[in-house]
Amino acid sequence: MLQIDTSIQNELIRDSLRTFPDECCGFLLGRETANNRVIEEIIIVNNSKEGDKRRRFEITAKDYLKAEQQADEKKLTLLGVYHSHPNHPSIPSEHDRVVAQPFFSYIIVAVKENEFVSLQSWTLNDNFQFEEEDVLIKTIIPTI
Amino acid sequence: MATIIIPTPLRRFTNQQSRVQSSGVNIKESIADLTTNYPDLKKNLLDDEGKIRGFVNIFLGDEDIRNLQAENTSVKEDAVISIIPAIAGGSGLDDINFSKEELARYNRHIIIPDFGIDAQKKLKAAKVLVVGSGGLGSPVLLYLAAAGVGTIGIVDFDVVDDSNLQRQVLFGTESIGKPKVEAAKERLQSLNPHIKINTYNTQLTSVNALELIREYDVVADGTDNFPTRYLVNDASVLAGKPNVYASIFQFEGQVSVFNYTNAKGETGPNYRDLYPTPPAPGLFPSCAEGGVLGVLPGIIGSLQANEVIKVITGVGEPLSGRFFVFDALSFETRVLKITKRESTPPITELIDYEQFCGVKSVQKKIKEISVEEFIQWKESGDDFQVIDVREPFEYEDINIGALLIPLGAITSRTSEISRDKKVVIHCKVGGRSAKAVQELEEKFGFDNLYNLKGGILAILQETDLLDSQL
């Protein structure tokens, strides 16, 4: 189960809409317990893909290293990656699958122009196939 | 011993260690040593031939080994090696490949410097929905299929009529009487067997339009009436898909690209920015009513196919925010600028477009009988007339002894049609006879006509009537 609160969800949607019609991308940082992953913050990363950013994203090795370092410094774990699918369902493509890493949660945000469509998370199983991961969106009750 | 930094996703193969020691004089040896100590890492780092996988980056210090001597880069005792997984993805394209036959077929595309294999891949990955397979749909479908658009959907509920062949070059004499989508699929699949054709033998309506259009990347509107034109436009806007539009009338043609989102994320105008409300009913008759020069849809439909290809490949400047008009008589062309209107109300849902355009909402349902009922009438000795509306050459080929009045002549030979007993009208599969019934009811007030469902083909399949010389 992947847990995110509404403010994180909003950040993901905002980034997806901001970059439309291009794909956005970034990292998910948080803590892991036996059955749960709680995303505590995200790192927005520049989509470094040269060419068609509407259908593709790429994160540079340097940005990846930085994300690992940030996770280390904050005593968090790098739990996964998010990216958007503009005008496309939030289902991983074959292209997503072939480069996917084990362990990581892959959040995909489907958006249309000015409109959030859906958010799903996926993890790779031992046969290198994607399986959907349950996502729990928690509403934070503001403290008075 | 060099230190290897293990990325988070691979730490479960190193007992959660983020840094491990490894020995080796170069990168290849260091990685080999690492996978010997932690064998589960192997399938994530190396391919079947033992080479480092394409999506694994290895850095020595802060330099990618691809910029050094790759696997042969030498490693010092105190070196820090980082394994960095490539983080990439997207909604697909790199998994598009071509067979030898396809490469040969598309060669003249691939060798254009500004087009190339990348544009050809985009064509193969693309899904285009063509609404209407008539005059405009014919060249659009032929050229998109020939160009290698990977998936083409065709929506049309009509059957091929002999009056179509003057301009609908997708069909031949042998297609008369067949559903258009079926005849189109056959022709396109023989032109290009490497693509997928989805057919929808149905009318596009407010109920099915969104669901259908969402399945595709681009819509090409080749319809001949205002209600469907507004429907295609609104559904494209709601689904966020570009709508490549064309229309023809008598000697004039028009082309534009609506609802197109450019690389900067700006979406261009749509049909409603051009025509917020439909014209008065009857002001612009359809081709069936007003006629059209047969070659005109060939010219305009080819321009429409060109725009579809540009929208898919991103090559060139699509005709978005511009409106092309061609006058075949004077050979004058104009390109008008169109912009989004502030005053155009946003499209929020699909409506009843026939009501919106002020045309009659549904065609009156005609009476039909099945082959089974037809036989029952025959056997019970009912007195009724049978009329065949096919062409003489079809009649000569095979018939059930009915009175032959080809569809084109039906309105001028009404005196031969009985008014005081039941009349069964048939053709090859039921399309032309339905038209005949409709026309005779509307214009001549007949109320005793029955369309034979499935036509003579159904009779052939279901009975031995022909053998027994009815």
Image (spheres, helix red, strand yellow):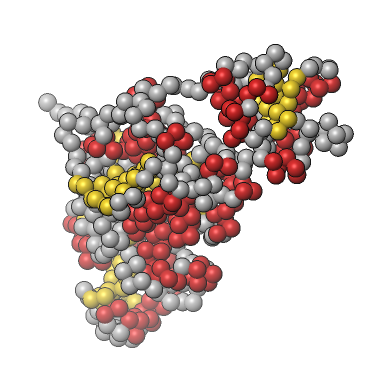
Return the x and y of residue B102 as percentages of the image width and height. Answer: 51, 67
- Judge whether A19 appears above or below A138 on screen: below
Task: Tell me which corner region of the image, top left, top right, bottom left or bottom right, holds residue A72.
Answer: bottom left
Q: Residue at coordinates 37% horizontally, 36% vertically from top-left?
A: B229
| Res A47 seen here | yes
The residue lying toward the viewer, choosing from B180 and B384, is B384
Task: Tell me which corner region of the image, top left, top right, bottom left or bottom right, holds residue B415.
Answer: top right
The answer to whether residue B349 is left or right of residue B346 is: right
The residue lying toward the viewer, choosing from B278 and B297, is B297
The residue lying toward the viewer, choosing from B221 and B170, is B170
Q: Residue at coordinates 75% horizontally, 42% vertically from top-left?
A: B396
Residue that extends furthest to the left in the rendered view of this protein = A144
Return the x and y of residue A64 as percentages of the image width and height. Answer: 25, 62
The residue lying toward the viewer, choosing from B162 and A133, is B162
Q: Quadrant of the N terminus of chain B?
A: bottom left
Q: Quadrant of the C terminus of chain B?
A: top right
- Judge whether B294 appears above or below B277 on screen: below
Return the x and y of residue A100 as percentages of the image width and height. Answer: 39, 58
Return the x and y of residue A71 as percentages of the image width and height. Answer: 22, 55
